[in-house]
Amino acid sequence: VAKIAGEKAGILKPGAPGVIARQHADALGVIEAEARRQGARLQRCGEEWDVYLQNGRLIVQTEDRLFDLPPPGLIGPHQIENAGAAVVAAVALGDPRIDHDALARGLAGARWPGRFQRLTEGPLAAMAAARGAELWVDGGHNPHGARAQVETLRTLATRAPAPLRLIIGMLESKDRSGFLAAYRGLPDRVAAIPLQTARAFVPPETLAAEALAHGLRAETAASLDDALDALLRRD
């Protein structure tokens, strides 16, 4: 963690503000040391600024201002702090065009294709909709990303409980065991598929075996279409 934080802290510049979200203690120490070395002014979540949801609004509190904004268009509890960091960073630019209305429009209109994106168009989305299902896609591929996915899925499930079925394909270079561990006990079925556009992918049989080892009900499919068709069938 400290090593990665040291690499990321390389973006800090002398005299410039550095806006950071909450950090692991080891990471925070490294970042603060680099900020002192560079003469960068840190703005830390929980210290110089904070963010929270209140009555459906995003509240961002800095040392001298309070922003009452719409919630971010991006889905997931983790996006609250991300949105707060974005607001503080945008304000730190000191550009008069970035006023309250601009911040509100930016938050509400934010889109990140491939990160917890609901697919509503195309043949796969139509296949899912015809069987009363929603189709979501997320490109997160490490344990941290998996935990964010699971947290978001649990939040959605509290609003509209529904069966969860997971289709997954991964590259050999990724921590598949750590990723799958985050999903333990959540999806009722998992389908492992090959990645059609990559050579160094984990064979579906290997991925399914790893999922089984983590207590997940797993199977294999030859393609995304086949996996979706199989998982949409009634048990």
Image (spheres, helix red, strand yellow):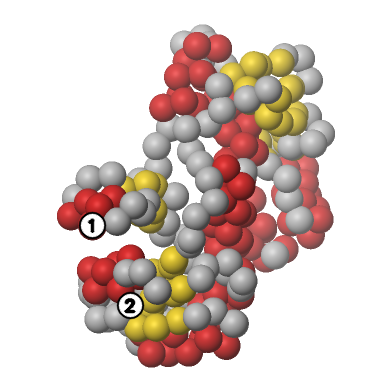
Nearer the observer, 66 or 181:
181
x 79%, y 36%: residue: 46
Task: Tell me the quarter of the picture where residue 80 sits.
Answer: top right
Name, please, the residue furthest toward the front.
Answer: 235
x 57%, y 88%: residue: 213
Q: Amino acid at mark 1?
A: Met
x 46%, y 73%: residue: 189
Task: Tell me the quarter of the picture where residue 168 sits.
Answer: bottom left
Side of 151 relative to 231 (left or right): right
**Residue beneath label 2, please?**
193
Task: Please state the horizontal and vertical placement of residue 76, each as a whole percent of the image.
Answer: 56, 45
Local packing at callout 2 (Cα closer than 10 Å; few below 14, some 14-19, many 20+) is many
Task: Tell me the quarter of the picture where residue 198 sits.
Answer: bottom left
Local packing at callout 1 (Cα closer than 10 Å; few below 14, some 14-19, many 20+) is some
Nearer the observer, 234 or 138:
234
Point out the tag, 1 or 2, that comes first from the N-terminus: 1
Task: Please state the horizontal and vertical placement of residue 124, each as a whole percent of the image.
Answer: 23, 57
Task: Please state the horizontal and vertical placement of residue 155, each as a whole percent of the image.
Answer: 60, 48
Task: Please state the horizontal and vertical placement of residue 174, each as a whole percent of the image.
Answer: 48, 75
**Residue beneath label 1, please?**
127
x 53%, y 86%: residue: 212
Dot 2: element: loop
Query: Could you tell me if residue 214 is visible in this image?
Result: yes
Side of 139 relative to 211 (left or right): left
Query: Could you tell me if residue 60 is visible in this image?
Result: no
Q: Amino acid at mark 2?
A: Ile
Distance between mark 1 and mark 2 Cα atoms: 18 Å
The quarter of the picture where the C terminus appears is bottom left
Name, please, the residue furthest toward the left.
Answer: 123
Side of 175 relative to 53 (left or right): left
